[in-house]
Amino acid sequence: MTDTGRRNSRTLSGLRHQGGPALWLAIGAPLLGGALLVWQAWTLADILGRSIEGGVPLATLAPGILLILALLLARAALGAIGERAGTTAAEAIKLHVRATLFSHLLARSPRAAEQPQSGAASAAIIDQVDALDGFFARYLPAMVQATILPVAFGAIILPLDWLAGLLFLVTAPLIPVFMALAGWGAQIATDRQARALSLLSGRFADRLRGLLTLKLFGRADDETAGIVAASDELRRRTLRVLRIAFLSSAVLEFFAALGVAGVALYVGLTFIDYLQLRATPLSLELGLFLLLMAPEVYSPLRLLAAHYHDRAAAKAAIAEIEAQLGVLPSSPLPLGERSTEGPLTRPSADLSPKGRGEERGPLAVTVAGLTLRTPDSARIILADTDLHIPRGEHVAILGPSGIGKSTLLEAIARLRAHEGGIALDQRPLVEWPEAELRARVTMLGQRPRIFAGSLADNIGLARPGASRAEISRAAELAQVAPFADALPEGLDTLLGEGGLGLSGGQAQRIALARIYLRDAGLILLDEPTAHLDAELEQAVLGDLKRYARGRTLIIATHSLAVASRMDKAWRIAGERLLPMPMPAHKGRSVA
C-alpha cells in the first residue's frame, strides 16, 4: 500500500468516532446475529435428527420449532437494526465531513490563489463525500463480521469435527487474500473514476456558468461534444471498476463453493461408511449441523466481497477531496474562528446590532508601511504606503482601472494578503475576531453576487431577520425602488442566478441596498456608481452620504465627481498613495 493509501485509510479510521453509538450498534448487531445463527442451526439439526432417527412426535418438538421461529425473528430484527444504525452512522459522518470541508473552504480568502474551482469544490463536498456512505454503512460492519464470524464458527466446529473445522479454517482465509489481489486493481480503477467524475463535474459547472459567452462565440456545440466525450470516458471507467468488482465476487464464490462442497462430500462419504476419519461415528444431528453451518461460514465473506468496492470508492473519494480541498481537517471551524489557510471565515448568522452585541461607532483606519502585490507576487501594487483616516471621515481613493484600488480595500477588509501594518482603531487587523470584524466592517465590490431569489431576498441577505419595512427602506435609499416598482411583483419579483434580467447598475444598487441593512462603523465601496448616469449617481451619493454620517466611509473610484463629494481624496500613482487637492471639475474621470 502506498503512503497515500495508508494516509487515506487513517483518515477513514479517524472518522469512525463521528458515527457515535450508531456505528457500534451497526457493528455489534450482526455479531449478535451470528451467535443466534449457531444456536438456530444447532436447534434445527437437533429437531431434524430426533424426528428422523428417533421418531419423536411433532408435539414434543413444538418448543424447539417455536424457538427456531423466535431466533429467525430475532435475527431479522437485528439485521434491520444494524442496517438502520449503519445508515444513521454514515449520515452523521457525512454531515460532519461536509460541515468540516465547507467551514474550512469558507475560512479561506476568496482571493487566495489556491482556491479550487467552484465546480470541483462542489463535486468534492457533495459527490465525493456521498461515496463515503457505503464504507461506513456497509463495508465496515461487513469487514468486522468477516474478521470475527468465520473464525468463531470454525472454532466452534473444530472440537465437534476436526476435519470440517480444519477445512473451514484453511479455506476461509484464502478468500480475503485473493480479494486483496483483485482489490489493488479495483483501487487504481476507482481512483481514476473518482478523478474523472471531479473533472467532469468541474467542467460542466464552468461551462454552464460561461454558457452565454460560449453561445456568443459559437462554441456551444463544440463544448457539448466535449461534455459528451468526457461523460463517455467516465462511463467506461465506471464499467472497469464494475468488472473488477465482479471478478472479486467470482473469486469468493469459487472458494466458498469449494469449501461447502468439500464439507458436503466429507459428510456424505462418512455416512455411507466410505470414509472414516473420526474416532466416533458421525451422528445425523452433527452431520446436519455441519451442512447447515457450511454456507454460513462463508456468508460474512460473501457480504464483504459484495461491499468491497465501497472501500475502494471511499479511499478514492478521500484522495480526490484532498486533491481539490487539501488534507481533510479533523473538525469544523467554530463560528467566527479564523483559519490558518486564509482570513475569511463564516459570518455570524445574526448580523443585527442586537445579535452582535459589539461596540458600535465609526472606526479609524491606520496603514503603516503597507506593501501590496499581485496574487502571483510578480508585481508590486503599492509599496511602503502610510495612510490615516480618522473616525467618521469620508475619503476617496482615486486612480484608473487596474491600478490597485480594489486590492487596497480588500486588504483593509482582511480579504487580501499584505505586508506591513493595518489597524482599525489602533487595533491591529490580525487581532480582530472574525465575527466582530465582519460586523463592524462592510464592503461592496465591483461585481456583487446576485442569487436566484426575489429582490427582497437578495437585499435581506445582509441581515437575516430584517423586517419587510427595513428592506423596503434600504431599497429606497439605494434607488432600487424606482425600477422595482415597475416590475410585476415589485420587491417580490424573482431574479435569475447571477442577476439574470438585471442591468449592471441595477445589480449594483441591489448590492448597495444591503449596505443600508448593516450597522457597520467602516464602509468600503468599490466603484459603487460606475454603471449609473450622472443624475442617478448624485442621487445615490446623496443618500449614501446621509447614511454614512457618523461612520467611516472609503470609496474607490475613478470619478472626480464622486471624489468631490468626499472630505478628502488620495490618488494611487507609481506604487504610491498620494494626497491630492479636492477636484475642482466635477464630472470628469481620472484617466
Image (spheres, grey):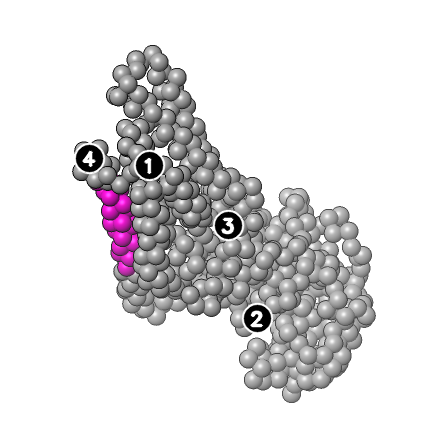
Tell me the magenta residue range: 239-265
Q: Is residue 73 magenta?
A: no
Badge nearest the viewer, 4 or 3: 4
Q: Mark 3 vs mark 2: which is more N-terminal?
A: 3
Tag 3–tag 2 contact (CB < 8 Å): no
Which of the marked residues, 2 or 4, is nearer the chain's N terminus?
Answer: 2
Which amino acid type corresponds to the residue marked 2 in the rendered image?
Ala
Residue 273's label in the rendered image is 4
Kindly tell me whether residue 148 is visible in this rendering. yes
- Measure the C-alpha gap from mark 2 to mark 4: 80 Å
Q: Tell me where residue 246 appears, x and y as whole percent.
A: 27, 52
Can residue 560 be seen here? The reply is: no
The crowding category of the residue bearing disc 4, from other C-alpha atoms within 10 Å (few below 14, some 14 to 19, many at least 20), is few
Element at label 2? loop
Kindly report the distance in space between the C-alpha atoms of the residues bearing marks 1 and 4.
22 Å
Mark 1 secondary-structure assignment: helix
Residue visible at 42% across and 53% down in the picture: 131
Residue receiving disc 2: 112
Which label lies toward us, 3 or 2?
Answer: 3
Dot 4 or dot 3: first in sequence order is: 3
- Mark count: 4
Is 402 left, or right, of 265 in this rendering?
right
How far is mark 4 from mark 3, CA to CA? 58 Å
Numbered label attached to residue 293: 1
- Which element type, helix, strand or loop, lies under badge 3? helix
Read off the residue under disc 3: 94
Nearer the N terminus, badge 2 or badge 1? Answer: 2
Residue at image coords 58%, 82%:
377
Q: Is residue 130 left or right of 188 when viewed as pictured?
A: right
Amino acid type shown at disc 4: Asp
